[in-house]
Amino acid sequence: MFSRLLRVVLFMLLLCATPFAQEGIPFFNTDFPPGEFAARRARVYDEIGSGKIAVVQGAPSPAGFTRFRQSNEFYYLCGVESPHAYLLLDGTQRRATLYVPHRNEGRESVEGKVLSVEDAEMIKQLSGIEAIYGSELLAEHLSRYARTGQARTLLTPFSPAEGLATSRDGAIRAVADVASDPWDGSPSREGRFAALLRTRFPQFDIQDLSPTLDKLRLIKSPREIALIRKATRLSSLALLEAMRSTVPGISEYELDAVAKYVYYRNGAQGDAYYSLVASGRNAWYPHYSSGKRKMQDGDFLLMDYAPDVGYYMSDVTRMWPVNGKFNAWQRELYGFYLECYQAILKHIRPGVTAGVIKQEALKDMQQTLARTRFSKPIYERAAREFVEGYGRSAANPRTSLGHWVGMATHDVGQDNGPLRAGMVFTIEPALRVPEEKIYIRLEDVIVITDKGADILTGWLPMDIPAIEKLMSEEGMLQRYPRDQDQ
């Protein structure tokens, strides 16, 4: 209690003494205490062991008029949101050293205060990091390790850093696109940093820290889950308002605008990913994001969108008819899909693998298929392929229920064992009718607890009567019509 009070007093004194302090804006996150960051670093020390050091590079200053956002990997370990920072973790001494630039008073006079090396004492109190130096001293300190032999192995993340609306899969694809461009071919920032370390300090054996960080991020703490829960609630509230606002004649981007209002009105710091608002046959493309089509009466609409709340994400999808009433084929196919989808949710629990859960759900899905009558052979064929495809997936020993969710929408981590408390993931099986370019998919966020599965989106309507009832209500777009000059 005394140490917490001391941190608050010190923070207020430093705030008052800083000439460029912004009014009412904290210099450090309020979502995690220093102890949680210290515990994460301690787990890194446990993983890398004695005789090794790790260096994590923070995000650079953004180009253009864009707010700075720290990389997930760096934020996870210390919570410091200063650009061009570095974190050194000593596995032998179990000690963290932060390297940050010096104060740029000219920039601060325009943009506001940024934590710098001149704030060393405040950073120590807020983050629990033991030592703070200017960025220019990192090379000198690494040279001491190399010269004295205190550490022969240096670990740094090889995987591309996750930033705003970035997941590992997308970041790797971006690196590959640049590498494939004959007029570019630039290495990734992480690759360039690792190459510099090898060139300047050949005494070190440079190894990849990414698997260690990925493993630690797989199990979420209660505070992490609280942020994921808030991001999921905002995503769900946005989808509710989008359902109310949907009528024939509006454009896809208008629902994007509705969701963004809900997110930013409630404190989101950005998008978890670009909005997927896909009407009609646009839904056939799972990551369609143009958002320019005007919706037509009779369209079926897919919306998949979530915010970034304190560096934690969500991923939620719902589908509904643009005119507010499910027509015959929508009821038929969506109704079949929904029954299968709910069978999966019903079996999710801790202590069993994804394969076991899928095999149990498959039996229910096969029963649903057997009793369902379809109006077209292509619908029956699509439904059968959906169930059989799920069965093939269930037989794969490396199968998963969906993808992890956390600091990235498609979060990191590899685990095919039994589900454990603290795991967070989505399910999103897709039913396709290629002949008519019909694509049906829902997505919910699930948190595994000691006792069961907490479906964070369980209250968000997915059944036909509830969706139709909700869509009969007035929406935001009706209360605030678009500019008539458009």
Image: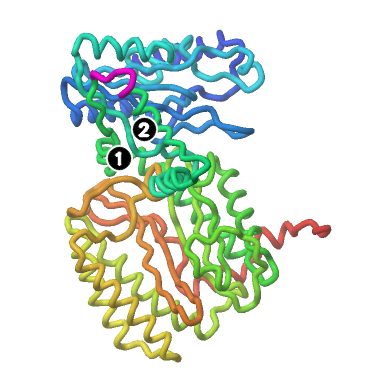
Amino acid type of the residue that numbered disc 2 sits on in the rendered structure = Tyr
Q: Amino acid at mark 1?
A: Arg
Q: Is residue 298 left or right of residue 436?
A: right
User: From what the image shows, is residue 347 above or below residue 10?
Assistant: below
The percent coordinates of residue 96 (x first, y second) are 30, 18
Residue 167, horizontal then vertical, whole percent: 41, 46
The residue under the point 18% across, 54% down is 418
Helix, strand, or loop for circle 2?
A: helix
The C terminus appears in which quarter of the rendering?
A: bottom right
Q: What is the secondary structure assignment of the residue under circle 1?
A: helix
Considering depth in this image, is 30 or 381 the residue closer to the camera?
381
Within 10 angstroms of label 2, few (less than 14), some, or many (20 or more) residues? Answer: many
Q: Which mark is residue 217?
A: 1
Q: Which residues are magenta?
A: 198-203
Earlier-in-chain disc, 1 versus 2: 2
Residue 329 shows in this picture: yes
Magenta stretch holds residue 201: yes
Q: Position of residue 465 (x, y in %)?
A: 50, 75
Q: Quadrant of the N terminus?
A: top left
Question: How many residues crowd around disc 1 within 10 Å: few (fewer than 14), some, or many (20 or more)?
Answer: many
